[in-house]
Image (tube, rainbow, N blue to C red):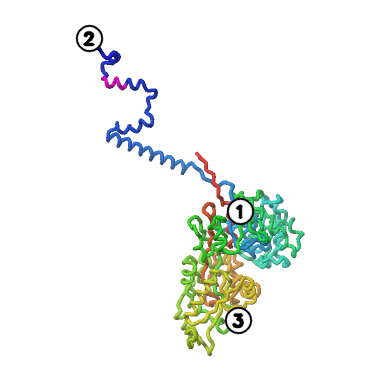
Amino acid sequence: MRFTNPLNFFKPKNLSAEDVDKQLVLGLLKKRWPNLKQFKYFPKFLSRQEKIILASAALVFLATFGWLGFNLYERHLKISPDFGGEYIEGMVGAPQYINPIYASLNSVDASLSRLVYASLFRRAADGRLVNDLVAEEEISADGKTYTFELTNKAHFATGDSVTVDDVVFTFNTIKEAQYRSPLRVNFQGVNIEKVDDNKLRFVLDEPYAPFKELLTFGILPQSLWQDISPAGMPLAELNLKPIGSGPYQFGSLIKDKNGNIKSYTLIVNPKYHLNEPYLEKITVRFYVTEEEAIEALNNGKVDGLSYLPWNLQSNIAAANSLNLHPLALPQYTAAFFNLNLPDDRLSKVKFRQALSLATDKSLLNKEIFNDQATLLTGPILPNNPAYIANEKNQAYNPDEAKKILNELGWLPGAADAEGKIWLTKNNTVLSLTISTPNVAELVAAGQNLQNQWEKIGLKTNLEILDSTELAGVIQARSFSILLNNVAVGLDADPFPLWHSSQATGEGYNLSGYKNSQADKLLGQARTESDSNKRYALYGEFQKLIADDYPAIFLFSQPYVYPQNKSLKGFGAKIVASPEDRFWDVLNWHVKEDRKLNF
């Protein structure tokens, strides 16, 4: 008897036995989709052509998916600064007077004051002067009267409004001799008047084109200071726990067992009239030396330093984790000749010219600043619109220098005990002393000049002074050659440094330079409101300086401000003084908010 496969009973006539077996297996499966273990056998069922097609399709899919993701990130993921976090900065020194009346005497005080106090005007990140407490202004046609209307949005941290009375009080305190404010010299011949509750007026004896540049000092609350005597002001607790109307207010301070302030914390002032800062706190830690501060930065104890000296930049352990902001600082370094000494050498223009020709400024720049400083030819910086180049003061020609000195009677003498030959005249060795403060870059520059000048036979001594000694030497004008830094501000006005009226006492005309034509040009320029005419006058002044050689203008070095890359938003490029690095602090942040935005 012939048996028939029972499955054949259900088998459609157009299906093979193999197809029927597959249907049976599929009918027994609970899930029709292969599991992960089964997928590994998938390539075995594909032909080579099918594999190529599938791989190509996968690449197209991944590329499309990646492009869509990148497009979404670039166009629709908005990253913006967020409130919170802390920035810790290391400074050398300690706070004493966080008070705009005295703060300019100490870089630590000046820096903290910039954060605590608002002023009539402030600077933008690009150095432009912009309104702070001033809402509206009016300047008279003769340039002698400045009328300002204050904003009604400003408040001190106590909640009290900033008023015209507060501005008048602060200004009069600066001008009052008993308070001994270093700002007093800026406002001789200037008076202030209260017009009404919202307006005040400055009246100048003579027009002064850059007058507004002087109005960046902080404003004190009259109600807290008016009953404190001039003798008591430096002793007041408010100097260390200040009340201002700036973006930050006093939070706390920490002292060691000897009473030295080691740490100082500022917190956001919720009453601030401009945009609220993003940083919740700013803490400053204080160190005795730059080396200690750099070590703290290397160890992560601080996020930045107020200043990184050029000679210590190699001490930074992980420079790639920092932003080394090179800020243009309007100051320069020069060797100032004392023209008022009873000395028949420095009083001669040709003698001063010889020393200038014997000075290789490029070598100074290379050996001290790795060619990062700006070399100078005169008293106005190259980035100033009033600048004109003076190639004569830039020239380096030691052979010509020796020739001029020989013509003046200084001839090579006999070798000394060390075998050195010095220039002599009437059996007197040509010898001069360079005096300089104990600042690393200046000491290095002084040693460099000493080596250069001795190569032409000028015996050169280097006198290094501490801050107290320096002040006394300048006051008495008891130096022959003073190698020093001078701040010139963002405005071009060189009057304080070169007008004959500033040549003695507390004046800043260090060389004692006196030239009636220069005085006339400087006087006219500071009263000229037309910028182009003013710059032309300064151009003529620079030509006089080039001919008279009252100083050797050496270099202007950038101000290096290191910050950890975790801090974002720093935008300053130029500062009038180091504390101005905080002008754009409202933009600094360590936290960010990410949101999809369609």
| Circle 2: element type | loop
Q: Name the residue under label 1.
A: 282
Going from N to C along the chain, the mark reached first, 3 or 2, is 2
Queried whether the magenta region covers residue 20, the answer comes back as: yes
Please rate how many residues cluster around mark 3, counting C-alpha atoms within 10 Å: few if below 14, some from 14 to 19, many from 20.
some
| Most distant residue in the front direction | 1
Give percent across and percent down for residue 538.
55, 69
Determine whether 344 is above or below 362 in the image: below
Give percent across and percent down for residue 117.
65, 56
- The one of 190 and 287 positioned closer to us in this rendering: 287
| Residue at image point 53% right, 51% down | 566
- The one of 462 and 15 positioned closer to us in this rendering: 15
Q: Mark 2 points at which residue?
A: 1
Determine whether 130 is above or below 552 in the image: above
| Most distant residue in the top direction | 1
Which region of the structure is painted magenta? 16-22
Q: Mark 3 points at which residue?
A: 341
Mark 3: amino acid = Leu
